[in-house]
Image (cartoon, helix red, strand yellow):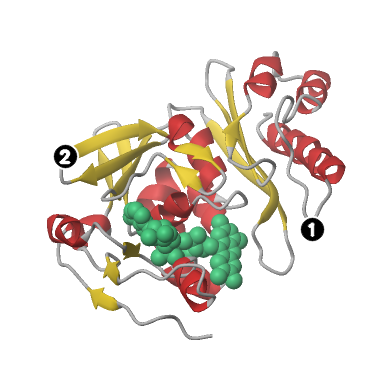
Amino acid sequence: MISYPFDYVRPESVEEALEHLGGDTKILAGGHSLLPTLKLRLSAPDKLVDIARIASLKKIKKDGDEIVIGGAVTHREIMDSEIIQKHLPVLSEGAAVIGDPMIRYKGTMGGSLAHADPSADWSAMVLAAGGEIVIQSKKGKRTVPATEFFTGFYSTALKDGDILIEIRFPVPEEGTKMTYQKFTQPASRFALVGCAAARLPDGSARVAFTGVADAPFRDKGVEEAVGDWSEATLEAAAQKAAEGQNINADHYASEEYRLHLAKVYCKRALLQLVN
Ligand SMILES: Cc1cc2nc3c(=O)[nH]c(=O)nc-3n(C[C@H](O)[C@H](O)[C@H](O)COP(=O)(O)OP(=O)(O)OC[C@H]3O[C@@H](n4cnc5c(N)ncnc54)[C@H](O)[C@@H]3O)c2cc1C
């Protein structure tokens, strides 16, 4: 199908982009989630504001003790970045399992987080890596921890007139280990269930899931149960996966099967972090 007609602008800066927002306007980044909704006429904006080439949104940098990924950096750029490979290799490895080459060349981390598909991969990794989302509007900038960014089914802390400009991560302390384990939906390659986990040098854990519920989440129950990281403890911790969550059910997987996958992939992720 062909979408309704719309205006298209390609601003040079975030400030210029902000001037265009408002009314029935949509931000366009990689377009891999937005354009299908236009073609299916699920969405009919008057104007698209293409932010994909705004230079300040295309940077990956180390800023003191933080790694900063610009809002329009593509999955592929994250996969290939030497800074990411050095400091947050889990993101480079995670990018490699998103979609197919075309999706990775055009799709952006910012677009994925803003879209908040409940099965998107980045959300779990950003949560487990302790990420923060930087948002700019005409009123200024604000920073939202990833734990407060995802507010429900396809919904986030972004408001009309906001642009997600950066994702910031603490540079992991020496000895930190992270992994992302995913059961791939074979047609779309989205995560039927994905579990990202981090083991910090003090023995604590950050564990996050995508694909399991309406929104991605940090799993405090599992995090508190990892104990001494012995295999028996991790087995028991993984059994707590997604406790208290409303588990999704759809034509790909029943609630019972998704919960089973959450436990299996949680255990796999935790075991990856032993030794
Ligand atoms: C066939 C296929 C397979 C895929 N497989 C996977 C997969 O395996 N794993 C996975 O995680 N994803 C997958 N995706 C999704 C893909 O990663 C998308 O590119 C991504 O979800 C959206 O990013 P985008 O840059 O394309 O955003 P767009 O489609 O351009 O935008 C998506 C939404 O976010 C808004 N938006 C975009 N950028 C910003 C910003 N900086 N600030 C505020 N709002 C913004 C837009 O207005 C729009 O509402 C797949 C998509 C397709 C079509």
**Residue 15 visible to an observer of this rendering:** yes
**Residue 132 location, x and y as percent?**
37, 35
**Residue 195 location, x and y as percent?**
66, 40
**Residue 28 location, x and y as percent?**
34, 66
| Quadrant that contains the N terminus | bottom right
Mark 1 and mark 2: Cα distance apart in space: 42 Å
The residue sitting at the bottom extreme is: 2
**Mark 1 packing: few (<14 Cα in 10 Å), some, or many (20+)?**
few
Residue type for callout 2 = Gly
Per the image, label 1 sits on a secondary structure element best described as: loop
| Quadrant that contains the C terminus | top right
Rendered residue at 28%/71% (across/down):
47
Q: Where is 168 relative to 225, above or below?
A: below
Rendered residue at 16%/40% (across/down):
139
Relative depth, front residue between 155 and 263: 155
Residue type for callout 1 = Tyr
According to the picture, the residue beneath numbered tag 1 turns out to be: 252
Residue 174 in the figure: left or right of residue 253: left
**Residue 81 visible to an observer of this rendering:** no
Q: In which quarter of the image is residue 140?
A: top left
**Mark 2 packing: few (<14 Cα in 10 Å), some, or many (20+)?**
few
Residue 256 in the figure: left or right of residue 215: right
Q: Where is 151 relative to 161, above or below?
A: above
According to the picture, the residue beneath numbered tag 2 turns out to be: 140
Rendered residue at 51%/27% (across/down):
175
Q: Where is 220 relative to 263, above or below?
A: above
Residue 60 in the figure: left or right of residue 224: left
